[in-house]
Amino acid sequence: MPVTNMVACAESAQPSQPEPNEDPVQHPAEARDKGASGDRGGGESPVDSEIVKSPSDPKHYRYIKLDNGLQALLISDLSSTDGNPSDSEEEEGDLEEDGSGDEDAAEEDGDSGEGTEESEHGEDEQDSDFEELEDESDLKKKKSCSEKQTCIGLVASNAVMLIQSAAALCVGVGSFSDPDDLPGLAHFLEHMVFMGSEKYPAENGFDAFLKKHGGSDNASTDCERTVFQFDVQRKHFREALDRWAQFFISPLMIKDAIGREVEAVDSEYQLARPSDSHRKEMLFGSLAKPGHPMGKFCWGNAQTLKHEPKEKNIDTYVRLREFWEQHYSAHYMTLAVQSKESLDTLEEWVREIFSKIPNNSLPKPNFSHLVDPFDTPAFNKLYRVVPVRKIHALTITWALLPQEHHYRVKPLHFISWLIGHEGTGSILSLLRKKCWALALYGGNSETGFDQNSTYSIFGISITLTDEGYRNYYQIAHLVFQYLKMLQKSGPQQRIYDEIQKIQDNEFHYQEQTDPIDYVENVCENMQLFRKPDILTGDQLMFEYKPEVISAVLNLLVPDTANLLLLSPNNEGSCPLKEKWFGTQYSVQDIEKEWSERWSGDFELNPDLHLPAENKFIAYVRFNLISPLIQKSPENLVLFDIFVNILAHNLAEPAYEADVAQLEYKLVAGEHGFVIKVKGFNHKLPLLFNLIIDYLADFTASPDVFSMIAEQLKKTYFNILIKPDKLGKDARLLILEHSRWSMIQKYQAIMKGLSVESLMSFVGKLKSQLYAEGMVQGNFTSREAMEFLHYVIQKLQFQRLSVEVPVHFRVVELPKVPHLCKVKSLNKGDANSEVTVYYQSGPRNLREHTLMELLVVSCLPHLQKYFRGFGILCYRGNPGNQIQVSFSMLVVYFYFTYLFIKHSGELADKRFASISLSYCVGTLVEGTTLGLIKSSTSSSSSFSITYNKLMMACTVFHSTEEVDKKIEEFLTGFGEKMASVADEAFKAQVVALIKLKECEDTHLGEEVDRNWYEVVTQQYVFDRLNREIEALKLITKSELVSCFMEHRGSGSKKLSMHVVGYGEEEKDTASSSSPSDLQSSSYGEVSQLTFLPVSPIMADVTAITDIRAFTSTLHVYPFHKILK
């Protein structure tokens, strides 16, 4: 909480050559997925690949843990502005010359350089109604309740700061650990440890050393942490580290210095007293439950550290020593050091110097059991406060359960972003229209006061006008209305994604900071976040978890809020006085009128709503269709290579797109090349045109071709060894006419392709195309047409001689059940999969809607039935998500049953995953070097899927047994359906209608829906409305008839089984492991092995040659669901 500025400034230390502060910005990368691997510190020093850093960060990192338990992060910064290593010898020579001086004379000055904290820095120069908010929002993350100040009297230029070496150490103890009879002892110890050491006994020797060599030091005490940091010229960093470390190894804490340092602590306290932010904190802390450490006087002063101990015969010096021995232990400590040294050198220094810090093996102080400290009658009141400055401000505060462990979600940051939004529909927008407020800040400052192991604060502070002060209850009501609106609407992923994108951009392109500030932040992060997140944990939003955000949102209600009203007008009506800072205040109940309104279901304000998606965002999508793609498996592979090389070529020239919040995606479809661009409309054409330019002038160097081809081999291989992917590939090979399988693509790439064959393919591809696009957003029709004109003009392609299909035709299955049973291509995988497919045939829009209703009706019974076998449908990733997309030819629905056998002691148990899908089209997906490859077959899909089942189920000895169980379920379901009550049927219909009536949460959802109509060339843009009208007319008898059509001897059934390896399948035990598989030859997955059918399914016809089977079948014509 309190901060001590122990400053030693070298007024003459100015190097002859300024040292720039950052490396050129590197190519953007996903910070959450990319660590520091591949970097080398100093050429020979391996970095820590687990630690994620910004792509624009030139520094190298290594994490180590010493034998005494101390954790350290080593930071090597060997780069200069041009990215080349700096001339260290020249640098050192310059610094030696400029930093020369008489060390003895410096020590004789007796000036330790210790300043006192001027907590309201700059307040005399400012005269603003926004000051109150600036105190709270100026820094994203303050290290204490006091703002950190710059070095008083510092004359050295920024160039000195930029080449400094720096170190910071965080001890996991703070003012919460203060003894009840010695308030402020932790802060006092922060001062006293610097009063000399056994190795360097001079009381102010370290400060004099820093002063001579252009350095400074600082320290701060927070609720549960104490941080020390210093910087110095690089040449003297090794010696400074040794001097500094002695304060944690063997500090003298000279008894004679106690009196002087008590006065220094008292001076800091006196300077902090006029700070309105500190006064509010102390008043707020006084509301905590008795005995909670939040109620302690963390600052300490002469009264608590000198006069009262003397009266009570307390030996402050002895207690200080005891506190140090108990709490300043190496296993509580985290250290960060940064310098222009190699990582190996830094590690050598740190191990040699800091391994001597003692470890007392005592448990770290823990206060996490003291939750809800403000759950008291005194909290939910209105507090009027007389501020030091002339300002009207209303602060609404909630004390929540600790949120630090949710740092990857950052629910408080998400909510504060909405609260602080200033656009239409926001709190501040409405308040400004009423002339009630000037500024608003909401959130959590992440200081120890706002966030610790016992609670987290969420506060909203509003700077009021005079009129606003007179209407503070109405203002509070608007805040509560807005929060209620957020609670009702729930978290929105589009908003979370927008904030996440902003944070990502800031992190990716962040400037390098002053080393002393950087190491201070890092060493504290090491106490809070897991190792990979040390550099990102306080900056990035990693995971969208609406349940976590909702849990916090639902706590932000009037009944648990504290209202604090600051105004000079309160003077004369505030008889109470806070003990330590003398803050005048009064406390009163919330007025009955407002209390009763807020305790009920109060109305929402229609002028308050979520931020709209940026109106300047637009979407542009183009599909460049070519018949050449599906001519052969070789062409499909060349097409995959082409799209990946084009993406590779675009990476550097499209570098700035992400900075400008533009997004692009290249998709290798089954029948065409899809370009997707999204962003602010005024810049979007530039990015789109850039993509088309690189497409028109496509080039491929031999080395890039080889790199992409080799990676595609691995990609295809990885797809084929997964039983679910293999089953889907084989099933679609049966159903879709003229389709090429993944195995055929794999065979083609293994035969070898050349860069010459690629360039020939691309030339032919570009010569004849059919281009179809969609532009949606803030563009006029004329502007939209310019995209198409540019494609035509730049690519100069000819018209196609015949229409090219945009999906596959589907074969008509015989009216007898068929089974295709194949062996898994992964000998190390015991997983098996069963998919049962029931074909319906071409249908109209009403009949498709009827099938959809059938699946919705089936779902609850499916869950109940298979739960009886130990299958848990709700664990893991939520599966009951409905995805609807229509185009089409054939209607069908199918079941997928994946049962997983584990080796060893669990070999006799099976784990299961159930999927019930209704399909009016099939989305085929395969990953190609990070690009999503997708296409629409002659039937599109609607699926309900269950994932990640966690319980062992009934043992099934064969895939045929699973197939039989699916049939058994359908028989029982048919009987239940016929007897369903009319009211239950109507409820199912209404539920599906409601689902279709759901408003799009963002423009992208509508774009996706419209784009599907374009790529399938159906153009029924009001399909949802038509389906809703069809649902209103469907009867229960129609639903039963629809189901019965797929049962009995006339049903068109195809079962697809992929059988894993194991004793149940009479396979020889395999010792293969995943690691073994990765080194196995690619030829192992080059063909399917068909298996015989078990006698328990003797009534089915086995498929042992897919091409022979499909060659005899009738092929449905292309069909579109238009009405």
Image (cartoon, helix red, strand yellow):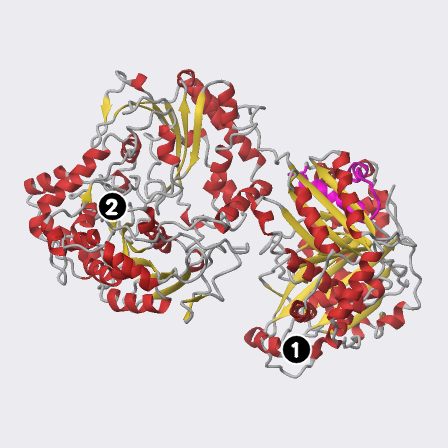
Other residues around mark 2 within 10 Å, as few (<14) / some (14–19) / many (≥20): many
Image quadrant for the N terminus? Answer: top left
User: Where does residue 400 sit, x and y in percent of width and height?
Assistant: 40, 40
Location of residue 377 in the rendering, given as x and y in whole percent from the top left corner: 33, 30
- The mark nearer the N terminus, 1 or 2, is 2
**Which circle marks residue 827 in the picture?**
1
Circle on res. 304: none
The answer to whether residue 979 shows anywhere in this view is no
Q: Is residue 794 left or right of residue 930?
A: right
Q: Quadrant of the C terminus?
A: top right
Mark 1: amino acid? Lys
Q: Position of residue 819 (x, y in %)?
A: 81, 69
What's the magenta bit mostly, secondary-structure-wise? helix
Q: Secondary structure at mark 1?
A: loop
Amino acid found under the numbered disc labelled 2: Ser
Distance (Cα) linking label 1 and label 2: 59 Å
Residue that lies at the very extreme toward the front in this rendered image: 16
**Camera-nearest label, 1 or 2:** 2
Examine the rendered structure and indicate whether residue 283 appears above or below residue 324: above
Per the rendered image, the range of residues in magenta is 1000-1028
Q: Nearer the viewer, residue 39 or 134?
A: 39
Asked if residue 706 can be seen in this view, the reply is: yes
Q: Secondary structure at mark 2?
A: helix
Work out whether 464 lies above or below 780: above
Q: Give x and y (percent) for residue 949.
A: 61, 60
Residue at left 90%, top 62%? 815
Nearer-the-camera pick, 413 or 823:
413
